[in-house]
Image: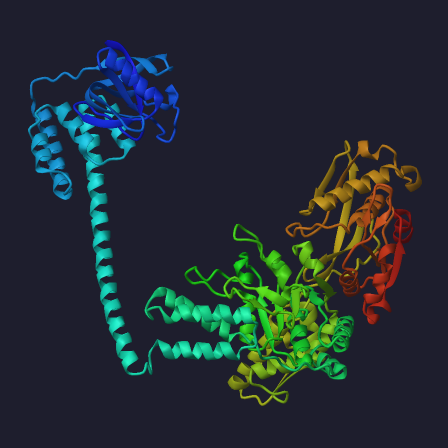
Amino acid sequence: MNLNCMPLIPMRGMVVFPYMTLNFDAGRDVSVKALEAAAEENSMIFLSAQKNAEKENPALEDIHTIGTVAKIKQVMHMPGGVTRVVVGGIRRGAIRELVSSKPYFKAVIEEYDEFYTQSSPLEEAYMNRLKKAYEEYFAQNPRLSAENYMSVMAIDEMGRLCDTIAAGVELKTEVKQEILEELDIYKRIERLIVAMNNRLQVMNIERKISHKVKERIDKNQKEYYLREQLKVIQDELGDKDGIGAEVSEYRDKIDKIKAGKDIKDKLRKEVDRFSKMSPQSAESTVIRNYLDTVLDLPWNKVTKESFDIADAETVLNEDHYGLEKVKERILEYLSVRHFTKGKNGTILCLVGPPGVGKTSVAKSIARALGRKYVRVSLGGIHDEADIRGHRKTYIGAMEGRIIAAVKEAKVKNPLILLDEVDKMGTDYKGDPSAALLEVLDYEQNGSFRDHYVEVPFDLSQVLFITTANTLDTVSKPLLDRMEIIELSSYTDEEKFNIAKNYLVKKSLEKAGLTGEQVSIADSALRDIISYYTREAGVRRLEQQIGSVCRKAAKNILEKGKKSIKITSKNLPDYLGKRRYHFDLINENDQVGVVRGLAWTSVGGTTLSVEVNVMPGSGKVELTGKLGDVMKESAMAAISYIRSKTDELDISEDFHKTKDIHIHVPEGAVPKDGPSAGITMATALVSALSQRPVRKDIAMTGEITLRGRVLPIGGLKEKSLAAYRAGITDIIIPIENKPDIDDIPKEIRNKINFIPVDSMDIVLENSLR
């Protein structure tokens, strides 16, 4: 082992090999002082590459351990304080110990000597393969001279050959460092051959790319020359069919639009740019599309709005059955527009389950006002550019959906329905709901600026109406811009009238039939509603009626019948067996079984809560795929009962001596929500006290630890479910008492609502 102490210079972006002569400029103070120290001693210096070439003041750990021991051949002091040095690589070395780092690096270096044995067939084969690889590289690299090639081919020492080639080949610094650090000569040659082959492949790809680019440039130059000739010819002919005709047409359109001077000046500048470009250039196409889009906007066109309130009421009644409160609010809205001359900036948001008629209500408003109707679906969009448009510099850029809708309407004051605002997403491309804030603000949208159009466009005359299935996912700032109108679930009676007066006729027309050929009895319609659909709206009901009409048409053709009547008896022949069944009231009063009420996206439903109490150690088990809210309600109910054991005549230590199992049937269906608290508490009290629960009563409400009953939502839908199940009494929170007015009269007349504010009153009315 040969150890020597010598100055060290960290090399930036450069790897020095043995047998390599190199000149470089030393600018850093530590490098200059290391050179001076080496020159004063024996001119030997150690050169090793930095791991990060950008680092100005490296530490020892920032320098590769393996480097090259070199001898300084010449040092020149250049103007500007730069020292130029010429060195010659001698042998590999490794840093073993740092002696000092100031004023320059000085380290103990272990030098590696390479010993060469007499030439063997293996060495000869490796050298031949390496020379062959260098020959291929030389043939593809015109920057190498013949002298380089001849000097390399004359080398007969394997290590020297490998290092000389590695020093002269264009490789990344990291790759060269790996080759330098490989002490096994055979592995070093293999690495170098692989690196050279990779470099050859890159050079071939670069050559192909350069060739293709040159071909395209030549083609573009030829096209440019021909187009210039065409321009001269067109000028001589008066430019009848050239680009000048398009420019003239654009200028005429700009003069005619009713827009501000700044907007017209901006468009005229774009036309001037367009006139000076080649018609075949990509930018010319971008400007042409931009001008077409902006000039197609309805700057001047408006439709005359109708303010006849009686006509509007007629239209709403023709198109929709029921929805009395919704119609009343819309007529109020239209009345205000009449007195404000159409300047009412309120944005209506129609909220309700699927199929209840939100979109068709918006269509009816447009028809009542005599406005053009355009629907923009926002469901699933998650890019702000969908609202504001893309910058026109991007390839494939286009205007946003709002401007596109106005362009589609071809008037400045359409009714635009923004459908499903609750289903917009958010990601790294922006927040579309935030972009909608300006669109829906009457005070701001008078100068809405789309990113593609780039000039302000007046949206203040547009009537925006939005729809949503739920408000939970709509941002609060956006909700603040809108007035909410709720469209709740239809009752069975409302569905029956809608089906009889609207859907049957519509489905018959779709099937090409008349009322004389196919008739559907009222009993069949009620059965379809009760046993073949379960939804809040009427979309599925329309599909089922359509299915009946299609099969009836097939039967008329196959069996040669002139007419078919669909009744309750033959309905299964058309729709199959009944798909849905309603849980009817229990035959007898039962202990530990209480009927609760729940709201779902397809309407209300009844929910039985069953409790079993068994001897045990106080375990509480909850089953039926219950959510966190219902589990917490069960725990709150147990705590309430423990605090009232004396009043309820229940053993004080039931929580230690009894195991309680609470189960809600239909275990595969997830259940959650704050409305089953009093139901669970009643079932628990019944099971623990062995007092039966009335079979004809249902309840809904949340419970607190003190036994207070909290309000719930969806009372109308829950009441419909209770009515279908044959329930006569419903216990509701006292704070929901005003909601009883929203329930259809035919149900209010048949169900007794019992408003309560405490659990004590619930138990008084439900337990025998």
Report whether residue 702 is seen.
yes
Coloring applied to the structure: rainbow
* Residue 442 image position (x, y, % from top left): 68, 66
* Residue 571 image position (x, y, % from top left): 64, 75
Residue at image coords 82%, 51%: 590
Q: Using the image, determine if residue 32 lies above or below residue 696.
A: above
Report whether residue 289 is seen.
no
* Residue 737 image position (x, y, % from top left): 87, 59
Residue 622 found in image quarter: top right
Q: Using the image, determine if residue 115 lies above or below residue 476.
A: above
* Residue 339 image position (x, y, % from top left): 77, 77
Residue at image coords 57%, 77%: 258
Closer to us: 631 or 102:
102
Q: Quadrant of the N terminus?
A: top left
Residue at image coords 18%, 32%: 168
The count of marks equals: 0
Residue at image coords 91%, 42%: 648
Which residue extends farthest front? 79
Horizontally, is 31 left or right of 294 in the view?
left
Residue 299 found in image quarter: bottom right
Q: Using the image, determine if residue 49 lies above or below residue 321.
A: above
Closer to us: 147 or 560:
147
Horizontally, is 546 left or right of 662 in the view?
left
